Image (cartoon, helix red, strand yellow):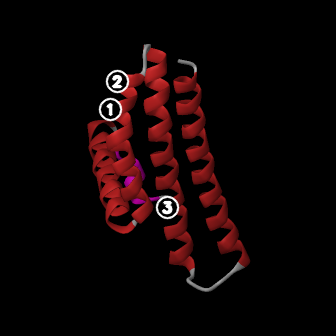
Amino acid sequence: MESPFKGKTGLVRLWNALHYSLEGYKAAFRHEDAFRQEVLMAVILIPLGLYLGKTGVERALLVASVLLVMMVELLNSAVEATVDRISLENHALAKRAKDIGSAAVLTSLTSLVAVWGLILISR
């Protein structure tokens, strides 16, 4: 069975997609401590990355590595919410899903540190 909202096209679809995305940001900010921390990190690191990057490529890498962390956190939060919606009982598959999402966030944070470290150390 397909969603009744899949039939939207053109500007209506774009408008709806924007609305759903903004609602997602609001929900993540309201309910996820980690996302709020990453927003604070982004508020600091994105302007810093734009300032510290000497070339367009460096600036892009510094900013993109911060945004990547936020993207992965949003996906991890979506997985956690879905798992919790299905059941709050302890289950091996639920734990696995949440642990894998957490590992993805850690990997994105490791990537951020590597990108920033490699660019700044090369100075």
Q: Residue furthest top?
A: 55
Q: Taking 108 as reference, is 46 above or below it? A: above
**Residue 60: in magenta span:** no
Residue occupied by mark 1: 47
Identify which residue is drawn at 29% across, 51% down: 22
Kind of residue at disc 3? Ala
Looking at the image, residue 93 sits to the left or right of residue 81; the answer is right
- Which is in the foreground here, disc 3 or disc 2? 2
The segment highlighted magenta reads 3-8
Mark 2 packing: few (<14 Cα in 10 Å), some, or many (20+)?
few
- Name the residue nearer the viewer: 6 or 33: 33
Mark 1 packing: few (<14 Cα in 10 Å), some, or many (20+)?
few
- The mark that comes first in sequence, 3 or 2, is 2
- Which is in the foreground here, disc 1 or disc 3? 1
Residue occupied by mark 2: 51
Q: CA distance from mark 1 to mark 2?
A: 6 Å
Mark 3 packing: few (<14 Cα in 10 Å), some, or many (20+)?
some
- As drawn, the label of residue 123 is none
Prevailing secondary structure class for the magenta stretch in the rendered image: helix
- The mark that comes first in sequence, 1 or 3, is 1
Q: Tag 3, which secondary structure?
A: helix
Does the rendering let one see residue 1? no
Residue occupied by mark 3: 78
Q: Tag 1, which secondary structure?
A: helix
Classify residue 55 by image quadrant.
Answer: top left
Does the rendering let one see residue 27? yes
Q: CA distance from mark 3 to mark 2?
A: 33 Å
Image position, residue 73 (x, y; %): 49, 54
Q: Residue furthest right?
A: 92
